[in-house]
Image (tube, grey):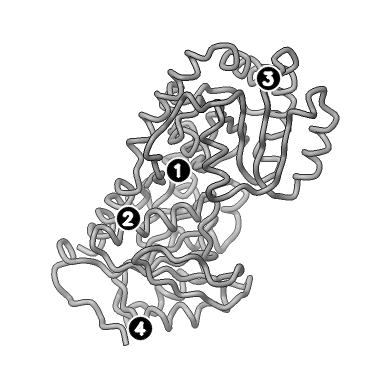
């Protein structure tokens, strides 16, 4: 039996924290936050529990974090009994929901029952802030019923406020990043890399066309786009009709050490998205010291450091992206300088900094 936390001063004692996720997976932008920030909260002395569906089976362990796999179901309302039972056992100080959009049915149920469940403070992080999501009643209820909304960017905070979140209770908490122990700029090869779900909003069709133009007279350069998704086969078909088809690869999902090896060997990272609530892939590229090109859309505008950590191009603009690629392809010195600027910017966004921000906000509301 888990012992309930002592009711000492919440401004100083370790906290018992329960995070609720859509699924227990450490891949993708949300998965990175779940794994990186929860481990950093443990390092700060807190007791952290992470609950959610486990569609891929037992998830990989996170050092010091207690995992609670839930039943497999796409109907969130069916998870209410599991949520209330877990909080009844844990008596967590904080219950924090992480998902693409707020699950109002779970947040509402916990709010109604929380007086008998230790009176936890309720937080929600909607990691996707597209306008098309908030017209859904459940997502609007979620941001309105939580005690505070912690979004991945100032841009997404504004969307939450528009959906009904209190201006006084909406805060940005930037995702962190794992920094490599060393960065060897001499290992770089003439490789352009992009990562993400293969879907139209990511702008990979624009990248393929822009690369074909830029690389036509630069035969040493190659392009790799990593990621699975509904548009993977159409993107492959588009690449195959390109004049540089033999230098464009779309291998599907790339994870773990394979992804790290890819980024360590690349010279240029491109994020050509039409929408991004934060842009975790861009931060990954910056942390690896790549010369970056990105569209300043959504929260991504906040991590290009006013264009110094990444060259900014308009979304869908093949000409602008092609010219930006050509400029970097032709100037090794510029690539090195931009890579160093990107790495320096990424150093300020550690998981430790994200965990400190979470803790500060948790204690503020507990106090």
User: In this rendering, is residue 17 above or below 206?
Assistant: below
- Looking at the rendered image, the disc whose residue lies closer to the viewer, 1 or 3, is 3
Provide the residue designation for mark 3. Answer: 220
Tell me, for residue 259, which label it has, or none.
none
Percent across and percent down for residue 353 are 30, 46
Residue labelled with disc 4? 89
Q: Are marks 1 and 3 in contact (CB under 8 Å)?
A: no
Which numbered disc flags the more N-terminal residue, 2 or 3? 2
Pointer 3 or 4: first along the chain: 4
> Residue at the location (50% across, 74% down)?
69
Q: Left or right? Give the position of 8 relative to 330.
A: left
Quarter of the image where the C terminus is located: bottom left
Q: Earlier in the sequence, mark 1 or mark 3?
A: 1
Q: Is residue 312 above or below residue 365?
A: above
Say which element carries label 3: loop
Q: Quadrant of residue 226?
A: top right
Give the x, y percent position of residue 339.
45, 24
Q: Nearer the viewer, mark 4 or mark 2?
A: 2
Q: Residues within 10 Å of mark 2 (few under 14, many from 20)?
A: many
User: What's the residue at 52%, 49% (across, down)?
Assistant: 29
**Label 2 to label 3, Cα distance in Å?**
41 Å
Q: CA distance from mark 2 to mark 1?
A: 27 Å
Q: Which residue is mark 1?
A: 158
Pointer 2 or 1: first along the chain? 2
Quarter occupied by the N terminus = bottom left
Nearer the observer: mark 3 or 4; the answer is 3
Horizontal arrangement in the rendering, residue 74 relative to residue 217 (left or right): left
Q: Position of residue 356 (x, y in %)?
A: 27, 51
The label on residue 40 is 2
Q: CA distance from mark 1 to mark 3?
A: 44 Å
Residue visible at 26% across and 64% down in the picture: 46
């Amino acid at each position: 039996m888990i012992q309930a936390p002592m009711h000492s001063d919440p401004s100083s004692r370790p906290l018992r924290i329960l995070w609720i996720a859509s699924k227990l997976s450490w891949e993708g932008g949300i998965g990175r936050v779940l794994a990186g920030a929860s481990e950093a909260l443990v390092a700060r002395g807190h007791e952290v529990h992470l609950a959610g569906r486990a569609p891929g089976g037992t998830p990989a362990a996170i050092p010091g974090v207690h995992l609670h796999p839930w039943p497999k179901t796409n109907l969130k309302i069916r998870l209410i009994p599991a949520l209330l039972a877990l909080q009844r056992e844990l008596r967590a100080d904080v219950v924090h929901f992480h998902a693409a959009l707020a699950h109002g049915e779970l947040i509402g149920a916990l709010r109604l029952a929380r007086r008998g469940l230790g009176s936890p403070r309720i937080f929600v992080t909607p990691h996707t802030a597209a306008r098309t999501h908030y017209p859904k009643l459940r997502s609007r209820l979620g941001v309105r019923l939580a005690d505070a909304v912690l979004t991945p960017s100032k841009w997404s905070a504004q969307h939450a406020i528009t959906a009904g979140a209190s201006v006084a209770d909406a805060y940005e908490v930037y995702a962190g990043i794992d920094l490599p122990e060393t960065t060897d700029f001499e290992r770089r090869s003439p490789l352009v890399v992009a990562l993400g779900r293969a879907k139209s909003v990511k702008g990979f069709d624009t990248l393929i066309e822009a690369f074909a133009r830029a690389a036509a007279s630069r035969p040493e350069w190659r392009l790799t786009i990593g990621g699975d998704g509904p548009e993977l086969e159409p993107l492959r078909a588009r690449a195959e009709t390109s004049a540089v088809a033999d230098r464009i690869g779309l291998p599907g999902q790339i994870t773990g050490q394979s992804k790290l090896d890819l980024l360590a060997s690349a010279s240029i990272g491109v994020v050509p998205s039409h929408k991004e609530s934060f842009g975790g892939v861009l931060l990954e590229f910056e942390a690896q010291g790549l010369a970056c090109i990105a569209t300043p859309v959504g929260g991504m505008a906040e991590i290009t450091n006013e264009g110094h950590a990444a060259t900014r191009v308009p979304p869908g603009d093949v000409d602008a992206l092609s010219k930006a690629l050509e400029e970097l392809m032709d100037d090794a010195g510029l690539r090195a300088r931009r890579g160093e600027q990107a790495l320096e910017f990424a150093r300020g966004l550690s998981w430790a900094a994200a965990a400190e921000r979470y803790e500060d906000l948790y204690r503020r509301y507990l106090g």
